[in-house]
Image: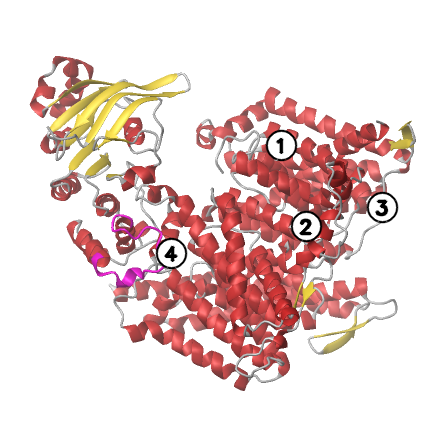
Amino acid sequence: MTSLSNTDRSVAGRGALGAAGPWILAALLLGVLPMLFGSPSSVTIMNQMAITIVFALSYNMLLGQAGMLSFGHAVYMGLGGFFAMHVLNWIEEYELTLPLPFLPLIAGLFAMLMAALIGLFSTRRAGTVFAMISLGVGELVAACSVIIVAFFGGEEGVSGDRTVAPFLGMEFLHPEDVYYLIAFWLLLSALGMYLFSLTPLGRMANAVRDNPERAEFLGYSARWVRYGSFVASGFFAGVAGGLFAINYEILTEENLNLATSGMILLVTFLGGTGYFVGPVVGAVVFTLLQSVLSLQTEIWQLYVGILFVATVMFFPQGLAGLIAMHGPAMRAGRLGSLAGPYARVLIPGAIGAAGVAALFEMFHHLRTAAPGDEAMTLFWITFDTHSAAPWIAAAAAAAGGLFLAARGAPAMRAAWDEANRIAQGGAK
Amino acid sequence: MDLILVTMIDGLVTGLLLFMLSSGLTLIFSMMGVLNFAHASFYMLGAYFAYQISRYIGFWPALFIAPVLVGLVGAAVERYGLRRVHKYGHVAELIFTFGLALLIEEVVQFVWGKGHVEYNAPESLQFALFSIADYEIAAYKIFMIAVAAAIFIALLLILTRTRVGMVIQAALTHPDTVEALGHNVPLVFMGVFGVGSALAGVAGVIAGPVLGTFPGMAVVLGSIVFVTIVVGGLGSLWGALVASLLIGWLTTFAASYNIGMADLLGALGIEPPADLSESLLRDIWTLSLPQVGPILPYLLMVLVLVFRPYGLFGNRDA
Amino acid sequence: MSVPALEISGLTKNFGAAKIIRGIDLTVARGERHAIIGPNGAGKSTLFNLITGRFAPSSGSIRLHGEEIGGLAPYEINRRGLSRSFQITNIFPRMTVFENLRCALLWAQGYRYSFWHMVGRQRALNEGAERIMEEINLAARRDVPAGLLSYAEQRALEIGVTIGGGADVIMLDEPTAGMSHSETDYIVDLIRKVTEGRSLVMVEHDMGVVFGLADRISVLVYGQIIATGRPEEVRGNPEVQRAYLGAVLEKEEAAG
């Protein structure tokens, strides 16, 4: 569990192999995944996932590592992506030789340059002011996309063709070819960002996050530490943009607007900002959620919104935090004692949530379905939304499930406290 | 000349509307240190509530009932949401209100659909009050100005003349001391959050018929409101007023005067290049004022922050 | 005579119309342990904040090793060899004890804003942090987040972080505030040990600590220094007796 945490454990104590272990494992996993999930749609999802991971990790360099909340991080991914798209078009137009795998590097450098300029005034202060400036800059750049048509391509955006830049005979025609390129950059970027957190600048980013004033009395200007994090984060966001350009071959205003910036905040927070792997977890879960839910229901964004607000209110450590929370109990071998109480809360809770979702879906169907279309299928059951029975059933499931879950909660809490008390007692 | 006057009135309407939002936001921010990202969402709720109410009992009751409802929603958000998140710090609070803004937009879409709803000004106000040259000034515009001015004066009186206002002013600077005096600070916070939200709700009720009532209306205005309070200086009510009017006039004038970059460059004696196919040059030469109007507030913000990092009237750190 | 470690002359600070520091002259020699005492509200903390750059002085000069530092930012002053602790514990709560100390060493060891060194591989850095951790007796708590330490441990860490960078002028703001007797003894020993060969300026209310530790004492009353001298001189000074010390010593004797 310790390797999950970025609360400042030094790697000096462990052997070089121990430190490299998780990375070798990750590389193997990335190599094997397309053999396990080889269908085109799986590869598409995996590509999207990998790009989101790079983007979210770069976002967490700001939010988790340096304590800077940005509402405009899409700007750097977008700028990197647009620039990569132009480079791709220049390769075609002027018949340049630049292998495709180098494109994300160029995108990253361009985004880094932009971050270096914008950071000059935006990182002067932290907290709310930084958040507001990032929002303003984000809106400014997004609005510019319809004005500076030469760079942003107006409403259609900029598109290109990735096959003009072959590498070692590979043409990158299919998504599967691109997968390995993206996986390579994912690994490289993640490693780069992890190592950054172990450099003096990365360590001081944590210090400035915790206590900017004290950092100043140790010889570091909080502002320039923030600036350093901001520029580095801009680079990796740009890499993500380059990968996006390669994968989708088109960039539009959507790639740099507030919605995308907000999405990456959501992804990162959902995963957990206090852990290096948090954004990875967040990106994987969110991408799966998005691709599965959006096929099933039109109001999936409503569920995502509820999930996000619930995360902020009840689990601010995110999913990675929830997992790590069970570390002590697991080491003490007490996880088993939690299973029963968990099941008594989570199973009725799930039924209740399904009931609520069913009510939402029926209401939505009632409002939006064409007149006369009164049949809908939910949870593999087809029924008439204008009859009372399904409403009563859903309401009963919702009320009953939530009631049972609420009743089981104290017992779950007690079991949790007990497991941790024993875990702590065992450790001492 | 006439156009200037008409544009002045339009800009005043926009500016006062912005102020109704930015004043509540500033009040909440300076008391609780929370920048409420969902503030514009309460504005949207105001418009939708008023739409729903006016379908049953008309616009005039809605003008009073809808803001009260929005205020109650706001108070509930503070009591059951924000207070819970408070212990994790201001960044967590900001993230919470951001999530709330997303959620409210989804809920509004869910309940009222994705398109515009038919929310119109009351018929009793649908006439031209007077005209300046050929431009007719709708009575509704003057009504909006009157409502905004009335709210501004009421706010000023409450803050400076009443006991509650004194407590609020004291809580602004010394939350702990006020608690020692026996005032219930959490209750004051809840009240201020509710009243701030209600103010945004009023803005929604009267702006909905003019600017349109649709799920994106919060996003459209929201970012501008944040820009406004950053430009004015976080936590300064006067700053919020000045910046609101400034941005109101700036955007309205930019939208009404179609001055192109070509005219400007021509006046400076720069001839357009014969070949405009170089697309970057074309972008520059075809630039016009209405086109750049929407980005002016953001440019203004960046400039203000570069030269006066605390905003025009600000003096406190966030 | 060599250049003094710290030389303050004609220093004033006004907050609006309120004159908090009203013309201070003070010299601290190299290797000297200097205590500043005085009643509450005399301006001790303000003086500290002026010297360390938290506030800019209204007028006057502050020289560190002969170099003017008045009005510089805290980090610039720190880089010139002056480090301070805080009255209210001011550490990095989410980072471990070891990480807190390592961060304190980074700038002094010349890493600046480096993003190409791996901190885990820098032998001198890690050994330095380990050594300070031993000195402040927190080696057993190496990997505990600083926010979870006991109060006395946090105070010790605060001192460790302050001395970590190897600054030769150390300023401690009420290092024993809020401590029990045994904790105070521990901290005093610690201060004596770690400030060996350095200049120390400290604000302290505990007269036992002050008279046991300081080579010289300055008495600050109402924004001015009314006396400076060796402990026995200050103790015998009638003006000091009248303005401050008499009451304090009586109270201590009554309590003791």
- Nearer to me, C73 or A211: C73
- Nearer to me, A333 or C192: C192
Please, what secondary structure does the residue beneath circle 1 have? helix
What residue is drawn where x is 56% and y is 71%? A49
Give the CA distance from mark 2 to mark 4. 33 Å
Q: Which residue is mark 4?
A: A202
- Nearer to me, B193 or A154: A154
Q: Is residue B192 visible?
A: no
Discs 2, 4: same chain:
yes
Q: Which mark is residue B12?
A: none
Which residues lie in the magenta part? C107-124
Q: Which mark is residue A143?
A: 2
Q: Is residue C122 found inside the magenta-colored segment of the image?
A: yes
Q: Which mark is residue B240?
A: 1
Q: Are marks 2 and 1 in contact (CB under 8 Å)?
A: no
Q: Is residue B75 visible?
A: yes
Label 3 resides on the chain identified as B
Label 4 resides on the chain identified as A
Discs 4, 3: same chain:
no
Please, what secondary structure does the residue beneath circle 4 have? helix
